Every structure is written in C-alpha cells, then in structure tokens.
Amino acid sequence: MSISDVKQPRVRSFALGAYVGGLAFTNDGETLAAATGAGDVHLIDVAGEGIKVAKAHGGAVLSFAAHPDGVSFLSGGDDGRIVRTARDGSTTEIAKFQGRWIDVLAVHATGSFACGIGKEAKLWARGAAEPATLGPHPSTVAALDFSPDGSRVTAAHYGGVSVWQVAKPKEKARTLNWKGSHVHLRYSPNGRFLATTTQDNAIHVWRLSSGQDMQMAGYRTKVRQLVWTHDSRWLLSDAADCFVAWDFSGKGPEGQPPLEFGFGDGTIMTGIAGHPAAPFLVGGFERGGVRLGDLEGKRELVLRESDEDDGRPLRAVAFSPDGWRVAAGGEDGTVVTFDLKTEPAAS
Amino acid sequence: MSQIPVTVLTGYLGAGKTTLLNRILSENHGRKYAVIINEFGEVGIDNELVVGTDEEIFEMNNGCICCTVRGDLIRTIGGLMKRAGKLDGIIVETTGLADPAPVAQTFVTDDEVKTKTKLDAVVTLVDAKHFPLRLEDSREAEDQVAFADVILLNKTDLVSPAELAKVEARIRQINPYATVHRTAKSAIDIAKVLDKGAFDLKRILTLDPHFLEGGHDHHHHDHDHDHATCTDPTHDHSHDHDHHHHHDHHDAPNPKHADDISSVSVTVAGDIDPDKFQTWITETLRTQGQNILRSKGILSVTGAVQRYVFQAVHMIADSSWGQKWNEGEKRVSKLVFIGRHLDAAQLKAGFEGCRG
C-alpha cells in the first residue's frame, strides 16, 4: 500500500448521540464497534447499512477493546461491569465490581485480558473463569498492556510500572521506576521497549533487556496515546499539531529530535492509530480533522478538514485489520469512516 | 463548550460537610451535580452521581514542589466528561485532613481538566465549637481556612455568642478576605456556596475585606484564555535533577506552630510598572511560594485603561486584564497574600518598588 493509492476516500458518517470513547473492528473488518458515554456499543456494518445497538452499560463506557476472539468486543463501564458484546448485539456480563469504575482494560490475542480496579489489577489468563489479583500498586492503575508474546502484563502507576508474569501472577512484579505519574503505556511489537506517557507532558521509554531508560519531552500538553509502527521502528504520539515520530532504529532516539511532519491547521492531535502492516498512521484532531500520515514519504493526506467553529475533539481512531479503512469518533458523538480502497463513483 | 464549575468542599471531620452536601443535592433546584467524595460509603449521600475516590497526591517530575496534583481527580473528571447528559456542576469533597492546594492546582495545571472544568471556589466548613482545639493540633485546619473563598462558621447553635465572636475573630485573623457565613446544621442558601467565581479573574473586582458581604455578585462570563504558569525555574525537562520530595499522604494531623498563618495587604497609590512587577512577583513566588498559600492582586498598570488582575496558588500564577478604570477614578494597586511566616515589611517594600 502506498499513500498515492489513496484517492478521494469514500466517507460515511454515523451520528450515535453520545461521546465516542472507543472504536474497534472485528478481525474480518466487517463490523466496526463504537462505545459511547451513554453505555451503548454500536455495531456498524461497514459495508452495508445496518447498525445494531447493544445496551452494554448503565452509565458511560470507560474502556473498550476488540475481544481476542476477533468477533466480539469487551467494554468496561462506570457501572463497575465488564461486558462482552457479540457482533449480533447480544451481551454477556464477564464480571462486576460494585461501585468501581472500569476505566482500564487490556486484551491479548492469546485470550488473556486484564482490568484495573483501583490500586489492583485483575488478570484473566487465557480464558480463565476467575481472575488473579495483581498488586496493590503504589497508586491507582492508570493503564495496562500485555507484552506482544502475552507472557507479561504491565501496569502503569505513580512512580513507574510493574511488570507481572501472566503464568505466575503470585510472583513479585519487576518494577521499573521513574518519578511522576505514568498514565498510559505501550509495548513495542518486538517486545524490546516499553513506553509510557507521564502527567508532565513527556514520554518515558525503557529498554527491557537492560532496564536502561530514556525521556522524551517537548510536548506542550499531556500525551494521551502512543502507537508503535508494526515494525517497531517508530514510536508515535498524539498531543502535537503535527505527526511526531521517534526513531528506534539504529542507536535509537536518544539525543535525536523526532521526525515531525504534516503541520496542518495548528490544531492538536487527540487520537492516533497505527497501520497494521505499513508505515502509516492516522491522527484525529481537536477540531474534528482527520489526517493520514506516511512516515516514509514524510507527507500527509487530509481525510477530513477541521471545522474551526463546531469541530470537537476526536478521541478514538482505528484502522481496520486490512488497513484499508479508517474510523474516527469523539466528543460530538459521531463516527466517520473512510474507505481508502473504494474508487470514486465514476470508476 | 462552557466549562463546568467545580466547588471544593473542605473542613475537618465532623464540621458538617456531608450535611451541607445533602442540603445542596436535595434542594429542588433542577440542577444536576456530580459529587466526588472520599471516605466512600461512610455516610449516605443522596445523589445519583456520587463517585468515591482515593485521594492520590502526585508530584510532577519537574522538581517543582508546589506542582502537586490530585491524580484521582484527573481520572474521575475524565470519566465524568464521557457521560451522556449535561452536568451543571461538580462538587469535590476532601477528607478532613486534606491540604486544599493540590486540589486547586489540579484545576489550573492539568490541560484536560482545565479545558472541561473551572475551579469555582474553595468552601470551608468550620465547627464553631471545636475549631479552637483543631487549630491547636493540626496544620490542616488552619490551611483549610486560609485557602477558603467562602467559610461556613457552622454549629453556631452549640456555642455562646461570646465564643462565636472569638472564633470568628480568629478566622478573620487567618483569612480576612473570605466571605464568612454563620450557620447552624449547615443550613445556607446554596447561592452563597455555589457559582461564586472566586478563581475567575474576570470576577475579582476588589480586594477589600468583606466587600462581598454586601451581596454584590457580578457575572462576567468571558472565555478568554488565561494562562496559568508556574514560576518555579526548576520546572524544566531535564532528567538528571535530584529533587527528593517527601510524599506526605496526610494520614495523621501535622502538629503546627501556633498562629503562624497571616495575611498581608499592600496598597500603592498610582501606577505599577508591569515589567518591574513581573520580575518581582516571579522572584517572590519562586522563593516564598511554598509559604504563600494564595495571593491576589488588582493593579493599575502604567498606560493601561484596564485593571490588571493577578492570582496565584502557591507558585502557580495566573493573570489577565480586567475591568476598565472609570474616568476620574482613583487608580490604586493592591496586592494581598495569605501564608505562613510572611514578612510584611519585605513584601510591602517589594511591591512599592514596582511603582511606575
């Protein structure tokens, strides 16, 4: 795929009526699910016309991911429930933690998943019926991520991260420390690096083999989301008015400025996703703009212009598993999809 | 989108916070409030949207000791903003032993929180009967009064008029700028507690003590961007500094030195040189910001037709242009500080040195 293959994408828009906080596709790419602040999971048939609405939660959906089975979705809500929603709109309650908010959720292709419950994390290893408890951590668990091989699950918290073994949840966690509040984390796909974002507008990265770490700063606002490219070469972030990519090839990014390109209309990126197989990324912006970035060509393609007056921040963006479809949704309660393969109507 | 006002409710355990909360929520005002409380489940709060959190005080990695924020509030407010339906306000109840500063700083430093919400006022409940004793054994009780915009001198029915007068005088000594309401069983018109705009620079019209008691309330809704900045120069992004801050979870009251909080008010007739003032206030907050809890000022700046309005919570300062001076109006500049171990003479001389 090359960015020059993308011409005039076909755009569809779906008004869901409440804050869209999460987007995910089924493995076959045919169903796009959007989780909202009204507690619903909307199941959109991306090629056809149908939308099913599953009433998954009593309050807002706070965390959302594609289920490892590839045909359903997992959500956590402020009603304390973890719910699985199938493509047909049926829902199953996986667990309920009365009075808690399930705002942190992580899944892995092996079937494991985990959520944060205050200072603890609950881990369902490879489809286990009952979860193991990890922690307590020094503070509330702010984010969780599985290592690419599924053998570790790591929690971000105040003062650093804790790396737990999925097969031995009772073993003491390996801790990687760095002062400050760590709010998000992502393993590189090759499993060599662990990147977090911190309250003080920076990114922190550990090289897992040595525990050696590095700090990347210069952001004017807090970084909310990180994405690695499929080949682990680039670490990408939101929170800037352009595409920012830190190069982990060769000696790595230490002492090097990041690659920055695609300075658009001055709005700040509020959501980001990486392409599953190519060095592309998509950014959603604070005034509703959507832009596709090409890391090799260092250029961008505007999929949707910002709306200076009425545009609202996009909080979730996603690529379909084949990389040919982009979805974006956010605070205005609308989901937009861009079909990058469809030729203009004339053809 | 307009920002949701946030009211911070502080006060020692037993001062009447829960009673006040329930009064606010049960009044038939047709408004929808979210309540963020600690000590979850201890006493029933009658509201659909009650969120229990653990107070988590996070220091920033930039070495600035005053840049502490409440991590739990950042997360909770992020979650509340996702919910469908309009919210008219958020009320944050702190634990009895809480330091109000990290709460206030959360609303001026975190980008997300500051975009969606605005700090409206710090409301402190004081138990008229037990306050003198609290002052003896805890620093927090004094901090909460010093930090307040509105003080409810509560449980007045449990003390004699003489005792009450004495307690109020003591409160005034710590904080002469807050509005004080005497209450029994936390009974108060909620308009006196909510929507005060105490942190809204556009609504700081005068710094005369007791001015607001006249019932004046001015609404100037203006959504200019005010930029809060930290004056601490160690606030950088290097990662080799070695500040080690003791992380105090406030599990136990801090013994205090008697009567160490005071206020200083400085008035200068005529104009202030903006550059001189900036240099001086930055240096003052940098060196004394740990002791200065709050400061506010209304300045007449050389050549400017508008008032220059300034406020700070510890080292984090915020300023903006306010109302115009009327023609023929006597232009004066006034600055007030509330804090520990303030050197009144030094502050006075410093401010006077900023004359234009």
Image (cartoon, helix red, strand yellow):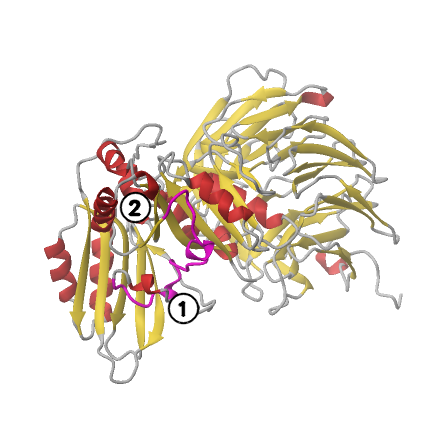
The residue lying toward the viewer, choosing from B184 and B297, is B184
A47 relative position to B87: left or right: right
Amino acid on which the number 1 mark rests in the picture: His
Q: Is residue A197 visible?
A: no
Say whether residue B335 is left or right of residue A244. left
Chain letter for mark 2? B
Which of the 4 quarters of the picture holds residue A83? Answer: top right
Q: Residue furthest bottom?
A: B327
Location of mark 2 (residue): B145
| Magenta stretch: includes residue B203 | yes
Please rate how many residues cluster around mark 2, counting C-alpha atoms within 10 Å: few if below 14, some from 14 to 19, many from 20. many
Query: Closer to the camera, B92 or B27?
Result: B27
Q: Nearer the viewer, residue B151 or A90?
A: B151
Nearest to the observer: residue A194 or residue B143 = B143
Write down the region rendered in magenta.
B183-208
Which image quadrant for residue B211? bottom left
Q: Position of residue B55 (x, y in %)?
A: 44, 35
Q: Quadrant of the C terminus of chain A?
A: bottom right
Magenta includes A174?
no
What's the residue at 49%, 22% (across, down)? A174
Q: Is residue B324 above or below residue B236?
A: below
Secondary structure predominantly adopted by residues drawn in magenta: loop
Residue B221 spot, x, y in % from top left: 47, 68
Q: Amino acid at mark 2?
A: Val
Quarter-of-image position of residue B298 = bottom left
* Mark 2 or mark 1, earlier in chain: 2
Q: How far across and down, in percent of the image, does residue A225 sit? A: 57, 45
Q: Which disc number belongs to residue B218?
A: 1
Q: In the shown orientation, is residue B246 left or right of residue B272? A: right
Q: Identify which residue is drawn at 62% across, 35% down.
A: A102
